[in-house]
Amino acid sequence: MQTNSLYQEVILDHNRKPRNYGTLEHASHHAVGHNPLCGDRLDIALQLEHDLINAISFHGESCAICKASASMMTTAVKGKTRVDAEALIDEFRDMATGKMDLNDPHHLGRLTVFSGIRDLPTRVKCAILPWHTLHAALNSMTSVSTETDDEPTQAITGNHT
């Protein structure tokens, strides 16, 4: 199967049947992410216990790419340590923005299906928003936006709690 058709199949599957979609009661960490240009808005909640992500969920209004990215992200980080989750955040951002050589060692696994997003600059922020929001939640920031004065696809802004 071609990479492009695999990408489309995965996006459609995770958009129709998102994993870990909904609210999480008793979350220890929470953040809201917003992409004003696209209109994506995600709430990410997680239970972090002894530096381990025991549970994670997301909900909100977003395009198919953002929802699929959030779905795959929550599946990838559930059961991981904070350090491992932060490493995945960095790797996913680098892959999506074209800064990663996929021939180099990485931990992305099935998430590499998003590697072609780097060729769609207007959609990069859609794919990265869940990851920025997870980073914010892990670092006790209440909100993030894809739009800042810095390079928008990499910058994270927020309000610390």
Image: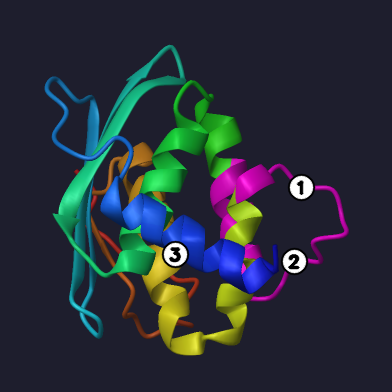
Kind of residue at badge 3: Ile
Res. 37 in view: yes
Q: Where residue 100 appears, x then y in whole percent?
A: 75, 66
Say which residue appears at 60% left-offset and 85% top-offset. 119
Above or below 38: residue 157: above
From the viewer's perspective, tell me whether residue 35 is left or right of residue 135: left
Q: Do tag 1 and tag 2 residues touch (Cβ < 8 Å)?
A: yes
Q: Does label 1 or label 3 sit earlier along the sequence?
A: 1
Residue 155 percent location from the top left of the image: 44, 71
Disc 2 is placed on an element classified as: loop
- Name the spot of residue 110 as percent of width and height, x first: 63, 47
Of 4 and 157, which appears nearest the observer?
4
Q: Which residue is mark 2?
A: 100
Of the image marks 2 and 3, the number of the one nearer the N terminus:
2
- Cα separation, mark 1 vs mark 3, equals 17 Å
Pick the quarter of the image with the C terminus.
top left
* Quarter of the figure that contains the N terminus: bottom right
Tag 1 and tag 3, C-beta contact below 8 Å: no
SS of the residue at dot 1?
loop
Asked whether, in this view, residue 103 is left or right of residue 58, the answer is: right
Left or right, residue 157 beside residue 52: left
Residue 74 inside the magenta-drawn segment: no
Residue at the spot of label 1:
106
Q: Which residues are magenta?
A: 87-110
* Label 3 sits on residue: 128
> What residue is shown at x 47% (from left), y 76% (from top)?
124
Query: Which residue is painted at 42% across and 56% down in the image?
Result: 69
Q: Counting residues from the N terminus, which is met first, the one under dot 1 or under dot 2?
A: 2
Residue name at image x 87 percent, y 56 percent: 104
Q: Is residue 89 magenta?
A: yes
Looking at the picture, which amino acid does disc 1 mark? Answer: His
